[in-house]
Amino acid sequence: MTHSIHGNKRWIALIVLCLGVLMIVLDTTIVNVALPSIAADLGFNETSLVWVVNAYMLTFGGCLLLGGRLGDLYGHRKLFLIGITLFTAASLACGISNSQVLLVCARAVQGVAGAIVSAVSLSLIMNLFTEPGERAKAMGVYGFVCAGGGSIGVLLGGLLTNLLSWHWIFLVNLPIGIAVYALCVALLPSARGHAHGEKLDVAGAVSVTVSLMLAVYAVVNGNEAGWTSVQTLGLLFAALALLAVFLVIESRVQHPLMPLGLFRLRNVATANVVGVLWAAAMFAWFFISALYLQRVLGYRPLQVGLAFLPANLIMGFFSLGLSARVVMRFGLRVPLAVGLLVAACGLALFARAPVGGSFVLDVMPGMMLLGFGAGIAFNPMLLAAMSDVDPSDSGLASGIVNTSFMMGGALGLAVLASLAAARSEAVQASSGDAVAALNSGYHVAFLFGAIFAAAAGILGGVLLRTGRAGGTAVQEGGHGQQVSPTDKTATESY
């Protein structure tokens, strides 16, 4: 399906679509800076606060593949508009939340809507720009939005929380969402879906999402309920049972949400394992370092946003193209391994940050290493996930690794936050120093995050193999800008 709009109108439509995507990208980072303010206002404790992040990540990751399938069946424009409407309404609910339950539920709805928008926006852009040169430029704009959104989110979150209140980190989405909806209706022609005859794998989407939510709930509440309690073990058993049901469904359904045959491909399987481990480390870095800066060092929200800026700018710089050129020069394994090991060093530096730490000596070095490592490693990881598959399946493979990334982040964050809470409780019981106890717990989380990142780098460096050039796609900013399989340089480097 190619949209029947031409000339400058397409570029205006691109800007509008990117504004919609920017809202989704913002909400993956904007909330981190405001977490202490949200906790103080609504009475969250250290472990339940994780659900403000996880409710979004779990539904987002669980619905990415389903959102793409819905777009194929019923039309990408229609699903984009539904996603924007739902996301804007959920943002309003988040902004006026006066209870923990309302905020977490609204965040879960945001995740569903964000998955739909993310899944279909790239398809809309690819259909708008069919000429290779123009498509490359359009994907550059899209990649810049995705790479720069994290920086904007952290800084904007600090600014709004500091000057107004945490409610405005969600309410800021309302005028953007309304404008994006109106402009999309005016600019994008209506088009029907083209995946006729296919059925939705609703059972697969429901089973895997509920399975992961039960697992995260069991881990988050493990310290309070007891790791060997009936509640914790029962929830973990139910999660495993539902995961088994999901695998059975995917092996038998005619149009599976996640075709299991792809995991027989070595690079696809390796990239997904690496993605889970790295996401666990990265999401813990965003979440726990924001808490360290505010609760241990006493930073205000705006200062936290500025502290994250160097890492996000470095990540954005590499995602805009340098990472892809590094891959063309050195292949997949070296940039992936080096990037993740450098990021592990950054997390290890945070694991020794003292109670009275300074920004220049104890915060900035770790932030810069993490920005450099993530910026180098992210594109090779996504490229590796597609290097074994046919070009026609590259979008599906990218969706699968993005799903693994979101799920790994949710589960890893739950595990590391629980480890940090357990350590903090033990230290406070023995010493009585609340701030030192918090810092000691954060050290444990950072250390395990460093181990996860290092393990991901080693696995990627050892297990990745040379992919078929015909099945590769280099993604700028984590999204599908393809390199022609006839490109001699790309062929040789792989």
Image: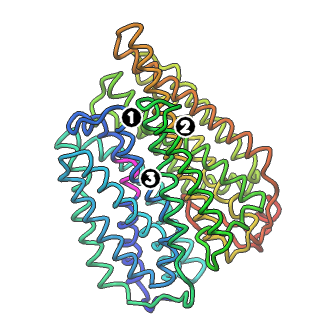
**Callout 1, which amino acid?**
Thr
Q: Is residue 243 left or right of residue 420?
A: right
Give percent across and percent down for residue 44.
28, 36
Residue situated in front as seen by the camera: 80 or 318: 80
Which of marks 3 and 1 precedes in the sequence?
1
**Callout 2, which amino acid?**
Leu
Residue for point 49% across, 42% down: 283
Spatial distance from mark 3 to mark 2, Cα to Cα?
A: 21 Å
Query: Disc 3 vs disc 2: which is toward the camera?
Result: 3
Q: Is residue 28 magenta?
A: yes
The residue beneath circle 2 is 370
- Callout 2: helix, strand or loop? helix
Boundaries of the magenta span: 25-30
Spatial distance from mark 1 to mark 3, Cα to Cα?
A: 16 Å
Give percent across and percent down for residue 55.
39, 51
In this view, 203 is above or below 304: below
The residue beneath circle 3 is 57
Residue for point 42% across, 82% down: 10
